[in-house]
Image (cartoon, rainbow, N blue to C red):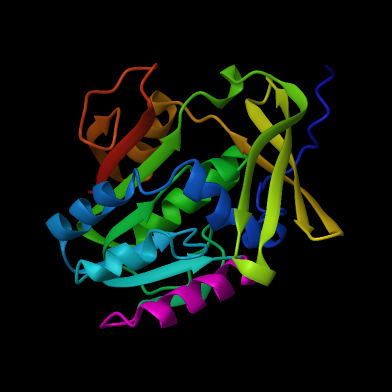
């Protein structure tokens, strides 16, 4: 298949459309597998926490429940609206602040956070080296000296097989008259030269005789642990640990996830 992925620097353009289905899909795939890891890290570090790409608040709310003072940032208004609704329903003390903004130029004072979290491959939606390096530099600026930077990478995306029009998930949402049957139909394209994996997603909603289709595209790239460690060092961080799962297990290239923990020098 030809490498047709456009030369773009951000993989965020489909996220506004994805917002309506993000929690539904993740409940069936990711679930809460990573939540305890971020909770434990926030408790260990203490203080003020910034979450990059906070989206619908899947990680933000558990972080706030640890007692951390949490700020979440995301550029998707649709994601943030759902995150705000989730936080209002939860009524946690010290309600987190959700900010619409660009993680490549964080709109916060210097040295204002004790920890920055980058969960679930958010940095891999930055498809250009310059943009990624700008984000790391921005994180270094807002972290306090010695502050913790946690990065969760989706492992080796270019090794994923390409496929076209595959039914990936089926399920329901709502109950009674509000019951909606949902099918996710997905295609995967690879640009192996640039290390970019593109997901063309179609969510089909069926309510009685009514059918609605929602199509959008999300792109990510693989950033190796070695490459990320080198970039962190250049941005003023020291790498303290590299993990291969959410329980602190050792890392290798075949690990389930790639987690890098750094500290601002």
The quarter holding residue 6 reads top right
Residues rendered magenta in the picture? 76-95
Q: Where is residue 195 in the image (x, y as percent from the top left)?
A: 63, 25
Give the image location of residue 50, x and y in percent. 35, 64
Residue toward you, 78 or 2: 78
Q: Is the magenta stretch mostly helix, strand or loop?
A: helix
- Residue 119's x, y, as percent? 41, 49
Q: Which residue is drawn at 33% across and 36% down?
A: 259
Which residue is more in the foreground, 221 or 26?
A: 26
**Magenta segment includes 77:** yes
| Magenta stretch: includes residue 263 | no
Name the residue rendered at 41%, 76% in the picture: 87
Tell me the residue at 65%/30% (across/down). 196
Farthest front residue in view: 176
The reply to whether residue 34 is in sight is: yes
Residue 23 x/y as whole percent: 53, 57
List the single residue furthest toward the left.
44
Is residue 234 shown above or below 164? below
> Is 149 left or right of 202, judged from the image as shown?
left
- Regarding residue 112, the answer to whether it shows in the image is no
Using the image as rendered, state which of residue 63 and residue 139 is in the foreground: 63
As displayed, is residue 187 above or below residue 89? above
Total labels drawn: 0
In the picture provided, is 196 more to the left or to the right than 58?
Answer: right
Residue 186 lies left or right of residue 54; in this view the side is: right
The residue shown at (30%, 63%) is 62
In the rendered image, the quadrant that contains the N terminus is top right
């Amino acid at each position: 298949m030809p490498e047709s992925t456009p030369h773009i620097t951000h993989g965020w353009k489909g996220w506004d459309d994805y917002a309506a289905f993000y929690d539904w899909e993740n409940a069936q795939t990711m679930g809460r597998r990573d939540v305890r890891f971020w909770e434990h890290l926030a408790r260990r570090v203490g203080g003020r926490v910034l979450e990059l790409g906070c989206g619908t608040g899947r990680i933000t709310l558990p972080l706030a429940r640890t007692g951390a003072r949490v700020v979440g940032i995301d550029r998707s208004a649709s994601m943030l609206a759902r995150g705000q609704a989730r936080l209002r329903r939860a009524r946690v003390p010290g309600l987190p602040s959700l900010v619409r903004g660009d993680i490549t130029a964080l709109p916060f004072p210097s040295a204002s956070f004790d920890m920055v979290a980058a969960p679930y491959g958010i940095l891999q939606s930055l498809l250009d080296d310059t943009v990624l390096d700008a984000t790391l530099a921005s994180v270094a600026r807002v972290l306090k000296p010695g502050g913790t930077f946690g990065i969760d990478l989706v492992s080796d995306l270019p090794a994923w097989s390409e496929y076209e029009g595959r039914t990936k998930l089926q399920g329901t949402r709502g109950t009674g008259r509000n019951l909606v049957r949902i099918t996710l139909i997905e295609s995967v394209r690879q640009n192996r030269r640039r290390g970019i994996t593109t997901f063309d997603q179609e969510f089909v909603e069926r309510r009685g005789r009514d059918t609605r289709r929602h199509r959008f595209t999300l792109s990510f790239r693989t950033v190796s642990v070695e490459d990320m460690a080198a970039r962190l060092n250049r941005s003023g961080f020291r790498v303290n640990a590299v993990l291969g799962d959410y329980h602190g297990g050792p890392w290798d290239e075949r690990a389930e996830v790639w987690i890098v923990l750094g500290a601002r020098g």
